Amino acid sequence: MFADKYMERVIRTKSHLCVGLDPILDKFPSVLLERAEKMYGKTPEGAGYAIFEFNKLIIDTIADKVPVVKPQLAYYEKYDHFGVAAFWQTVEYAQKRGLLVIADAKRGDIGTTSQAYAEAFYKSTEDEWMSSVAVDAVTVNPYLGSDGLDPFVDLSSGNDKGTIILVKTSNPSSGELQDQIIENNGKCISELVCDYINSCSNPIGKYGFSDVGAVIGATYAKDLARFREILPNSLFLVPGIGYQGGDIKLLEAAFNEKGLGAIISCTRAINYAYQTVGVSEEEAKDSILKAVDSFNQSINSVLIGAGKYFIDEL
């Protein structure tokens, strides 16, 4: 199961941190961009080269420090097929280094189109024309209902893959839809999504979690305890610390009483932790490593303070 694999990585690394891989070229070390431009010019091909090189730098730095990485697909797709190729190269490279990979794709459609999306990320054993490289989990948009979600849940079930469904996202306008109350039952829309997640949260793994998880933003920390109560067997992907302003000190509610079940995501504050693009690649690695160590220490300190740190006993 994806949930068990994630928990085993948590135990091994003593970390609940997920490092996003969102490539922003003008934040890359200039020495890397200069090399890409010399080889390919300022082209999508050059961008794809630079992205994969920078991702390798990050992955090599953090592979033994965190359980999982999360590339956001839009940052790759903007550079045509070269960017998409860099995405899949990144997936393969990260997994070879022992990391799990969550594709932050937020896909949502219906019928055979949703099935095709699911097969693109999880891969289909029946299609001999497809690559064998698959992600470990993918984020999915629930707006189209079960028609859009079922293909992901069905294909991931029994294949050690995870489906992570948007419930309460970190953006400021999320409440325009997600917080709206349904008159006939008094639940808000995000709670209806939770009902769907609970309906397909079997089997439960040995650490108490299913392979169907939820995205719950760190910027709405007051809601974390409520959603943890509603979804006791779901992993929470929690974006929004760092650049978006989520407070690490308030995240303990995302974890269960054993201090498990949350995937705390941080991207820019780690990827671009160095102060200037004029750094060398080794200096960039050093800054990234220090940032990861700092976030790991902060998250574990919160769990210790809440009486929820039991990793050493698992």
Image (cartoon, rainbow, N blue to C red):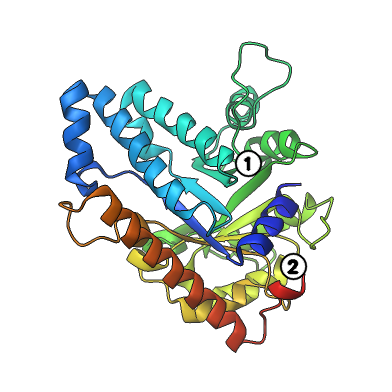
> In this rendering, is residue 170 above or below 48?
below
Q: Which mark is residue 185?
A: none
Residue drawn 83% across the image and 59% down it: 206
Instruction: Tell me the mark number nearer the camera, choosing from 1 and 2.
Output: 1
* Residue holding disc 2: 232
* Residue holding disc 1: 136
Give the position of the C terminus as an image quadrant: bottom right
Front position in the image: 126 or 35: 35
**Picture quarter containing residue 110?**
top right
**Picture quarter containing residue 253?**
bottom right
> In this rendering, is residue 250 above or below 100?
below
Front position in the image: 281 or 263: 281
Q: Regarding mark 2 in the picture, which secondary structure is present there?
A: loop
| Distance in Å between CA atoms under marks 1 and 2 | 21 Å
Q: Amino acid at mark 2?
A: Pro
> In this rendering, is residue 147 above or below 26?
above
Residue 23 lies, in percent from the top left, at 33, 43
Residue 44 lies, in percent from the top left, at 26, 25
Residue 166 lies, in percent from the top left, at 56, 53
Say few, some or many: other residues with alpha carbon within 10 Å of mark 1 (under 14 / 14 to 19 / 20 or more).
Answer: many
Residue drawn 58% across the image and 73% down it: 224
Residue 144 lies, in percent from the top left, at 58, 40
**Picture quarter containing residue 64?**
bottom right
Q: Amino acid at mark 1?
A: Asp
Residue 141 appears in view:
no
